[in-house]
Amino acid sequence: MLSSDNPLLRQCPRLVNFTSSEGKRLFRGAMDQGHAESFFNLMGNFSTQSSAMFGGVSSLAMALNALEIDPQRIWKGNWRWYSNELLETCSSKEEVLSKGMSFDEFTCLAQSHCHLDVRRASSIAYNEFLNDLESITANNNSASQIMIVSYSRSHLGQVDQRGGHFSPIGGFNKAENMVLIMDVARGEYPSVWVNARSLYNAMLEREKDVLGKSRGYFVLRAPGTTTTATASSLQKPKGRLLQQRQHNHHQQQQQQPKFIKCSDCSRKCSKRLHA
């Protein structure tokens, strides 16, 4: 585990180590504001990725266990539990170890285990991302939904990492606009607080090994669950805000189908080639 004075973090002024005094202060603020309950559900099911390219698989296993979704399969002994081994990707294990997981492939895998809302950053306004953060991390919603982000590490200044990464969100300090990323690459990177705008920009960066689409985030819920709207979402939007929300909703319906098909996926995996 990296210490707070590790050179990897010293080169990242926009990141705050979760275990530092500043990180703890931000966490206390998020708790006081009612936007840190997600942390406890996730922390009790924390999964460290077993390979440098398994961030997506480990994040998904962690979220599914936090949501208490039954995998309908035995893990070990009599235990039914999500692990990397139980999550079968479209690409072969060798392909994932070599190339990692694309945004589309994560979508394909996750949608077969839970209710999934997909958000490409290029089709979601920054304020909509903030609204989702506020709603998902709220105390009354944290047990029923989890957010996983797909972002560029290099955009956040993390050295020795030029590609993308997946990790769940554990909290939101709205007063200081800071988001807690619970990094599943625990042996190399600690969990950190990052400015929400910086994270949004890191999600806007396009994937380089597929079709050049932006990254983004996912909202996962157990099948059959409902969520409680936040006070801000209950306010009736007016004028341009209403038009913007209607436009964004229309874009989401057009660009983000509920179930992605192999023909729509940007990853040319072995399953798609033989479909």
Image (cartoon, rainbow, N blue to C red):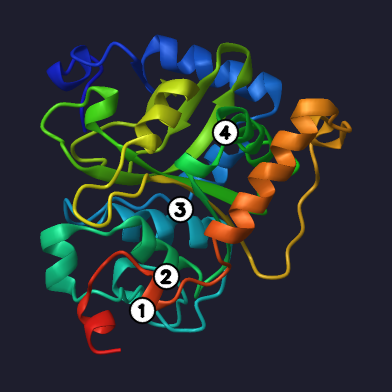
Q: Earlier in the sequence, mark 4 or mark 3?
A: 3
> Is 201 on the left-hand or right-hand side of 65?
left
Residue drawn 29% across the image and 73% down it = 85
Within 10 Å of disc 4 (Cα), the crowding (few <14, some 14-19, many 20+) is some
Mark in the foreground, 4 or 3: 4
Residue drawn 15% across the image and 59% down it = 99
Q: What residue type is labelled 3?
A: Asn
Q: Which of marks 2 and 3 is nearer the N terminus?
A: 3
Write down the residue under mark 1.
76
Mark in the foreground, 1 or 4: 4
Whether residues under marks 2 and 4 lie with C-beta atoms below 8 angstroms apart, the answer is: no
Write down the residue under mark 3.
45
Whether residues under marks 1 and 4 lie with C-beta atoms below 8 angstroms apart, the answer is: no
Residue 68 location, quadrant? bottom right
Q: What residue type is labelled 4?
A: Ala
Q: What residue type is labelled 1?
A: Lys
> Is 112 on the left-hand or right-hand side of 14?
right
Write down the residue under mark 2.
108
Mark 1 vs mark 4, CA separation in Å: 43 Å
Q: In this view, does 97 lie above or below 217?
A: below
Q: Can residue 137 be seen in this view?
A: yes
Mark 2 vs mark 1, CA separation in Å: 25 Å
Residue 220: image location, x then y, percent = 56, 57
Write down the residue under mark 4.
125
Q: Is residue 139 visible?
A: no
